[in-house]
Amino acid sequence: MGGHARWALAALLALCASSQASSLRYCDQQAKLTAAQQDKLLRVSGIIKAELDRAGVSLAIISRSGLNLDLFGVRYSHAGLSLKASPETRWAVRQLYFACEEQQPRLFDQGLSAFLLGTDEPALGYISLLLLPAVAASALEPVALDNQRALNLLGASYSANAYPYSLRYQNCNQWLIELLASAWGGTRPGADSRASAQGWLKEAGYQATLFQLPLRPALWLTAFSPWLNLDDHPEEDLGQARLRVSMPTSIEAFVRAQFPGAERLEFCHTDRHVVLHRGWEAIAEGCEPGEHDTVVVLD
């Protein structure tokens, strides 16, 4: 139990980690990529951008794998918003990250290629895209590109396992779901505030991802990390050794419920090929293509 608990909490700790510009340092250890691995991920990025262009959309909710969360049955750890009109570069990803040097969360616009380079397992990776109906995308894009509104939703204190209905902390995926709430519930007064966003999410029935830890004593390990906290979680959950945390899967489920017309594209890559799978069912483990999947062979 002890080893599993330590491993599980270590995974939760790094939820919002990703490789960024060399001037930024993160608290976790990123995989060191070879030149061949970097080249492959650049090619994967090009395939995804081309698919976004073909879809004729202006934005997409994007998630990537990066951490081994198999113990919880979770494939995706980090999500952001890929914007065609990004001020950084075409299809850059707007996201929250935690700047360890400054000891505070920041918003960062990161090129799609660099976003993929943040993976913890470059030999096998998964990327999910949600393409929104026009009405949802048109409401979301101006909010996402409005720096002040996006910053108004940035919490002051970071916690990797932040509870979704507390203002005390925030993680990367929680910022994103609050941004969606601000855009889609924006007729309410103060819609760009965290409190208003969380209120709308609760009314709309948003459910965060449930992490069930092996035993309650596993929660004691959070005392050894300043980026894991329990004082925002309900006592009822703590008593049952469970944590509710915003994750890409819970965000996707919420978007699907709100906008049944949303489309999902899932990519995976190995050293041999890239697979594109369309639909809400998960792509096969090991990046094995299905009958109707598109396969791009990597030379």
Image: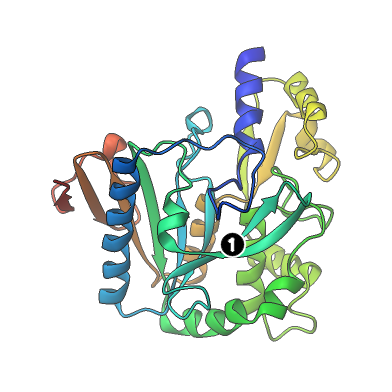
Is 198 on the left-hand or right-hand side of 40? Answer: right
> Camera-side residue: 242 or 183?
183
Question: Where does the image place residue 287, in percent across and percent down from the top left?
Answer: 26, 40
Quarter of the rendering occupied by the N terminus:
top right
Q: Secondary structure under badge 1?
A: strand
> Camera-side residue: 183 or 32?
32
Q: Give the colour scheme of this rendering.
A: rainbow
Residue ID at (67%, 78%)? 147
Q: Is residue 286 depicted above or below 59 in this figure?
A: above
Q: Is residue 190 depicted above or below 11 in this figure?
A: below
In the figure, residue 58 lies in which quadrant?
Answer: bottom left
Residue 1 visible (yes or no): no
Question: Where does the image place residue 37, in percent across and percent down from the top left?
Answer: 32, 42
> Mark 1: few, some, or many residues within 10 Å (few <14, many ≥20)?
many
Residue ID at (65%, 21%)? 5
Question: Where does the image place residue 153, in percent across and percent down from the top left?
Answer: 73, 69
> Camera-side residue: 210 or 203?
210
Report the residue marked by disc 1: 95
Could you tell me the amino acid type at mark 1? Answer: Gln
Q: Is residue 220 depicted above or below 21 in this figure?
A: above
Residue ID at (80%, 24%)? 220
